[in-house]
Image (cartoon, rainbow, N blue to C red):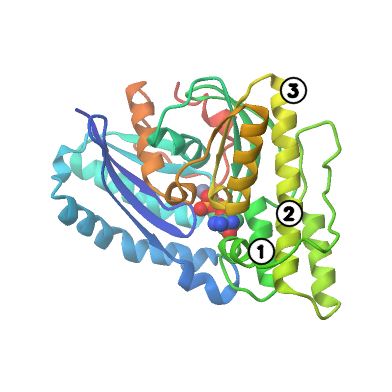
Amino acid sequence: MLATLAVETSCDETALCIYTDEKGVVGDIILSQAKVHFPYGGVVPELSAREHTRNLLPLLDRLLKETGFDIKKVDFVSFTLTPGLILSLVVGVSFAKAIAYYLGKPLVPVHHLEGHIYSVFLEKPVEYPFLALIVSGGHTDLYLVEDFGKYVFLGGTLDDAVGESYDKVAKLMGLGYPGGPIIDRLAKEGKAVYNLPRPMIDEDNLNMSFSGLKTAVRKIVEDGSYSKEDLSASFQCAVMDVLQKKALLAMEKTGIRRLVIVGGVSANSELRKRFSELSEKLGFELHIPHIRLSTDNAQMIAYAGMERFKRGITAPEDINPEPNIPLEVFGRLWS
Ligand code: KG4
Ligand code: ZN
C-alpha cells in the first residue's frame, strides 16, 4: 500500500488530504478563507499567505487525530507547486518540504490544474483521450488530455478567467466574495433580459474573452437602477453560451466526444444543467466532479500525486514554487 499526504495552498483554501492507493481518501480537511477576503471583494495575497501559515499545522494535527492515521506511514508528500499566488504557494511548499524532511520521504510536485482535471477520477476514471474544460478563478482553458501528464493546450481566455469575472461582477454589484455562488443563487430568481455581449463566440477558434462582458455589466451598474437578479441571470447566460459553444467546437475540431468540466465554476448549477442537457441531446460523454471537488481541495492533489509517484516522478529537495508553469510544460517535466 502507498500513502500520501497532500498539501494545497495555491489560493484561499488551506487543504490537506491523506490518501492511499488501496483505500482512497482516508481523510481530508479544507479551511476556507472566504470570510477573511469577503470585505475586499477578492483574495488579498498577503492575508492568504498569513492564514495558510497560521492554519497548516493545527489542520494537520486535527486531520491526524480525526483519522487516527500514523504520519510515519506516509510514503511521500504531494503538494501544489504551481500555478497560484506565489506567497501562498511558498507557504504550502515550505510546509510540504518540512514534513517530507522530517519523515525522510520524497516530495511529489503537482500542477494545480492537473489536480482539477483528476478530481473527476476520484469518483470514476475517465477513458483517454478526453477534453478538459477548466473553469476556475484563475484559468479558463480547453485541453486535450491524451494520457496522464500528456496535455495539449487547445485554447483559453485571452483576458479574465470565468471565475474571476464572476467575482468581479459580484464586486461591481456589491455582493461580496466569492461571487460565483452568490450570482449562481441570484440568477435563479432573475431573467436574462439584459443584452450582454458574448465576445469571440462566433470565431472559429478555441479562444475566449470575458473582460468585455464585465465592462458591459459595469456600464449597466453605473447607469443606475437595475435588477441584481436579472443582471446576474443575464451575465451567467452570456458566460454559459460562450463556454457551451467553445466546448462543442473543441469536440468538432478534435472528434473527441468525452468532456470533463472542472474547476470552481464547474460547481455552477446552470453550467451543470446546460451541459448535462446538451450531453443527453448530442450523445457525448460528460464528467463533472461532485460540487465539493469542483472548488479547491487536496483530494485532487493527492490523486494526481499518487499517479506521479507511481510513474517514478519526485522533486529535488530544493524545489521552489512557480507562479505559473503552463500545464502542458509541467506535464513534460521530470518525466
Ligand atoms: O477552482 P477554484 O476553487 O480556485 C481556483 O483555482 O481559482 O475556483 C474558484 C472560483 C471563484 O472565482 C468562484 O467565484 C468560482 O470558482 N465559483 C463559482 C461557483 N462556485 C465557485 N462560479 C460560478 N458558480 C458557482 N456556483
Ligand atoms: Zn483551483
- Could you say which disc has been placed on residue 309 in the image? none
Residue at 83% over, 71% down = 220
Q: Kindly report the distance in space between the C-alpha atoms of the residues bearing marks 1 and 3.
A: 32 Å
Position of residue 6 in the picture relative to residue 148 (left or right): left
In this view, 267 is above or below 127: below
The residue that mark 3 highlights is: 253
Q: Is residue 250 left or right of residue 11?
A: right
Q: Are marks 3 and 2 in contact (CB under 8 Å)?
A: no
The residue under the point 28% across, 33% down is 106
In the picture of the structure, the residue carrying the numbered disc 1 is 187
Quarter of the displayed picture in which ligand 1 can be seen: bottom right
> x%, y% of residue 17?
30, 46
Depth check: 202 or 64 in front? 202
Residue that sits furthest to the bottom in the current view: 224
Q: Is residue 157 visible?
A: no
**In terms of depth relative to the viewer, which is nearer, 194 or 152?**
194
| Disc 1 crowd, CA 10 A, few/some/many (<14, 14-19, 20+) | many
* Image x and y of residue 43, in percent: 55, 65
Q: Is residue 61 left or right of residue 208?
A: left
Snapshot quadrant of residue 218:
bottom right
Q: Nearer the viewer, mark 1 or mark 3?
A: 1
Task: Classify 286 as above or below 15.
Answer: above
Q: Which residue is mark 2?
A: 237
